[in-house]
Amino acid sequence: MLRSAVLATASAWILMPQASLAQSSAPSGAQNLPSVTVTAPETRRRAAATPQRRATRSSVQTADRSKPQPQRNLGFVETPLGPVNGFVAGRSSSGTKTNTPIIETPQSVSVIGAEQIRGQKPNKLDEVLRYTAGVRAGTFGADTRNDWWLIRGFKSDDVGLFLDGMQLFYTSYASWRLPPSNMERVEVLRGPSAVLYGGSSPSGIVNVISKMPPAEPIRYIETGVNNFGNAYVGFDVGGPIATQPQDGKLFYRVVGEVRNGGTQVAFTPDNNYFIAPSFTWKPDADTTFTVLASASKTDTRGINFLPYQGTVTDAPFGKIPTSFFVGDPSVDKFTREQEMLGYRFERNLTDDLTFRQNARFAHIDLTYRGYIGNGWENINTAVMGRYNWYAKDTANQANLDNQLEYRFNTGPVRHTMLFGVDLRGYQIDDYQNFNFGTVPSINVFNPVYGLDIPLTGAPFRNFLITQKQAGTYLQDQMKLGNFTLVVSGRNDWVETTQAGRDTGATVASRDDSKFSGRAGLIYNFENGIAPYVSYATSYNPVIGLNASNQLFLPETGQQAEIGVKVAPRGFDGYFTASVFDLKRQNVATTAGTPILLNQTGEVTSRGIELEAVANATKELKLIGAFTAYHLFNSRDLDPSLVGKTPTNTPQLLVSAWADYTFKIGPLEGFGFGGGVRYVGSSWADPANTLEVPAVVLGDLALHYEWQNWRTAINVINVTDKIYVASCSFPTSCFYGDRRRVTASVSYKW
């Protein structure tokens, strides 16, 4: 039976020996790289014997017009896995898994390149997304544990994180973290993407593209420190390795960073260690094989869970200090060890047929221990209650994605057909325990630390959950004149098992099978205007347990979207506008406490997104984004919540960033940039009676380049605004980032 065979293969794949190298989450320490010129593709050895159909097709797909497109960046050939020229990307593979111009993709796509990342100096991935349309980044404010974001109003960091086109799923507390210093580009694909990627968020995905071994030498080192005493040093070295002609070409790269120091919260370090070696072998012009490895360690402490009164509104004594630590430094810890090993293989079998295989095995070991804030015990005396918490999660994830791309014509219609088979295996060893009423309360202004209270009783969760997923997908990109029609279909077979860790006995299991599809049409006018329409369904077999320790039901989703993309001729930039209607069923929501989840009926998100990105001149680069939507419970087990907006979710986001660098004159090499972010109000309770106010934040960047040196000062929240990023419940509110000033210096040679 097909399902049995493929699921058995996925099972074997997940249980393979653990990889030894892995990835970390450190801020951008090696972003400040020399510009890289990507050479045109090599001439294939059998080119003389075969008509050059591919070259013709490539130029047609790049600009399917009767008039030639202006070449905006002479000497720079963009690929979906390579650098972005300035702030403006022209191509992406996230929307189709093929090398497709963004202007010909009937779906919302945003691309953030390494130059933008370097200029804004983010500490972690969610900070990379702050100026992207449709994304609410940093949901829980100044949290050093994880990356958090919403896409089109839905939580997407758990099932919407992808690295090099393959998912990094997490459940419970076994979360992954990726460092900005190893990101070549970050692509945000909005809307359902399950048809190509299998189980994922119906609101969209964030696909991080790793830095690959370069054809030209890179030698780079950077160090910096911020006003909280958090210092780092990072490096990025790579280039070609001398080989004999008969052995092909070999390239390498090693990116690494060490970061240690404090944060705005007392007793909460942000310590990260990360290294990522990679190698590319090109035996001939038709074959590329890249090995990507990484290892990392994170050492920090848990985020504060603070009450609404005392953060959003005044308590009798005023506000809780943002530096207050609600846990106990002798008890609290959050440690993550993460390893990954994978490869990318591509082989051009003929001029019109390409095979690709991508694979990765990832392992994570995470420990989370601490005392968690549980609301006021006596607000008049500033005494807060706490509960005792412990989680130990170990998870393995294996991905294998096989793709066959065939380019052919049927009369006047040009096709790019993609057939794929992917296997995914995930297993988590989940142990959780908590006690109420055993931990002493704490006074906000006179905290007493050094009390290690052991946990008692049986664990709340003590399970081994395994999920094996196999999927087959087929996509056809059809071009007729200026029309591009994309039609995709996929079927998934999923097997999920929950077993007791102590006995090994199966507690629960379920088998699921589901079809998902997508259709999109875009028309490219000669003047650079491209209207489009699309419809997609989504399927996500959720891994995890509800508040009753039962397996979650699969999520489903549907979206209709219409929009327009504008790339004016002679202008290095583009503008996009889209409106959408997105429904998500079986959404996981909090149940009684922030750590327990149940699945409600349906949540609807309807909205509009506007985005502008431009290399306006060789000195000036611009980004602008506007997002407004109406997010509400369209069905719920509790009728009183129908029509209400889920907590943590602002419905209006506006941002803009500009960077100007002098290219000539006495100020040559000096540059400055700045941005403004508006985050709308949100709700702190399911009944929508407690509001978290909107906030306006400003960011600043100053930088100077001289010969091989670069110095920079980056400031986030330049006015040092004290604000609450969001609240999950009235007892669970989270302060946003205070002013953070980072000074850095780098050298390349």
Image: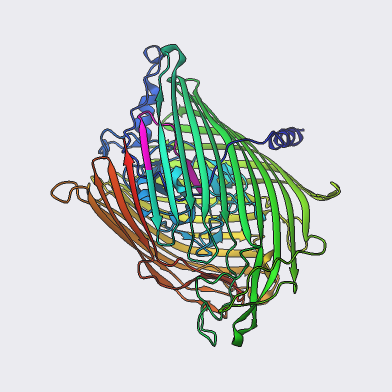
Look at the image and name its color scheme.
rainbow
Residue 589 vertical position relative to residue 306 in the rendered view, above or below: above
Residue 239 vertical position relative to residue 644 in the rendered view, above or below: above
Magenta stretch bounds: 205-221
Residue 589 position, x and y percent, is 65, 65
Residue 403 position, x and y percent, is 56, 31
Question: Looking at this view, is 590 or 320 the one in front?
Answer: 320
Residue 412 position, x and y percent, is 41, 31
Question: Looking at this view, is 57 or 26 the one in front?
Answer: 26
Residue located at (41% from left, 13% from top): 245
Tell whether position 212 is magenta.
Answer: yes
Residue 251 position, x and y percent, is 43, 26
Residue located at (46% from left, 65% from top): 737
On the image, which quarter does residue 198 sit in? top right
Q: In which quarter of the image is the N terminus?
A: top right
Does any portion of residue 318 appear in the rendered image?
Answer: yes
On the image, which quarter does residue 218 sit in? top left
Q: Quadrant of the C terminus?
A: top left
Tell whether position 164 is magenta.
Answer: no
